[in-house]
Amino acid sequence: MKHSRSVASFFSLLPGAGHMYLGLTRQGIQLMLLFFSDLFISTSFSLEFLGVFLPIIWFYSIFDVRTKSLYEGTLPNNNLPIFSDIDSIDDIFKNKPAEKYIAYILILMGFLSLLNNIVIPILGRYYDYQILLYVKHFIISLILIAIGVILLKGKKITIRRGDELCKRDE
């Protein structure tokens, strides 16, 4: 089915809506979930640095819809690449890699929320607030770098299937 590129581009201004117009409901919902979750978390927990992902998600949505609107055949309604391990909502809560990443994200958000909303304001009464902000940004940067290195390094697992050995990154 041929879709109007201009209408799809107009709907893509709201992340996910353009995908839904093209019949990609799953991808549209996932983009909306990413965008509005990031917006909610960054404003509710005063974690302003998460707002950097908003334009990334928004531009991805726009350019992806513009590319897919040129396709004349039926588009596959697959998951977005970031959700490729998840087939259904049940998969999030089973032993899948997505569960590990969700746990890391929740722990990181809890720690940063405590640091930003409780520790810094209390210490701000006793120390110069500007110095505390530098220390906070330094700690957040170190944590994000450490998590990135840990995720890139990964663990090598050896799995024996029948007579062959399989190595896998986890």
Image (cartoon, grey):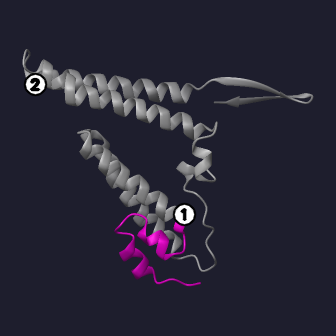
Residue at 54%, 69% in the rendered image? 24
SS at mark 1? Answer: helix
At a point 59% along the width and 26% down the height, the residue shown is 154
Foreground mark, 2 or 1? 1
Q: How many other residues sit within 10 Å of disc 1, few (<14), some (14-19) or many (≥20)?
A: some
Pick the quarter of the image with the N terminus.
Answer: bottom right
User: Circle 2: is it few (<14), some (14-19), or many (20+) Cα within 10 Å?
Assistant: few
Question: Residue 10, percent across and down?
Answer: 36, 76
Which residue has dot 1 on it? 26
Is residue 64 in sight in this rendering? yes
> In which image quadrant can residue 146 be found?
top left
Residue 53 screen position, x and y as percent: 35, 48
* Residue 115 placement (x, y as % from top left): 25, 25
Q: Which mark is residue 141?
A: none
Q: Earlier in the sequence, mark 2 or mark 1?
A: 1
Query: Vertically, is 169 above or below 123?
Result: below
Residue that carries the numbered disc 2 in the rendered image: 130
Which is nearer the eye, 94 or 38? 94
Residues in magenta, as a range: 1-25
Tell me, yes or no, whether the highlighted magenta stretch contains residue 42: no
**Residue at position x 37%, y 50% in the image:** 37
Question: Does residue 3 show up magenta in the picture?
Answer: yes
Farthest residue in the top direction? 126
Q: Position of residue 40 (x, y in %)?
A: 30, 49
Q: Amino acid at mark 2?
A: Gln
Write down the quadrant of residue 49 in the picture.
Answer: top left
Q: Quadrant of the C terminus?
A: top right
Q: For the residue marked with disc 1, what is the amino acid?
A: Arg
Q: Is residue 84 visible?
A: no
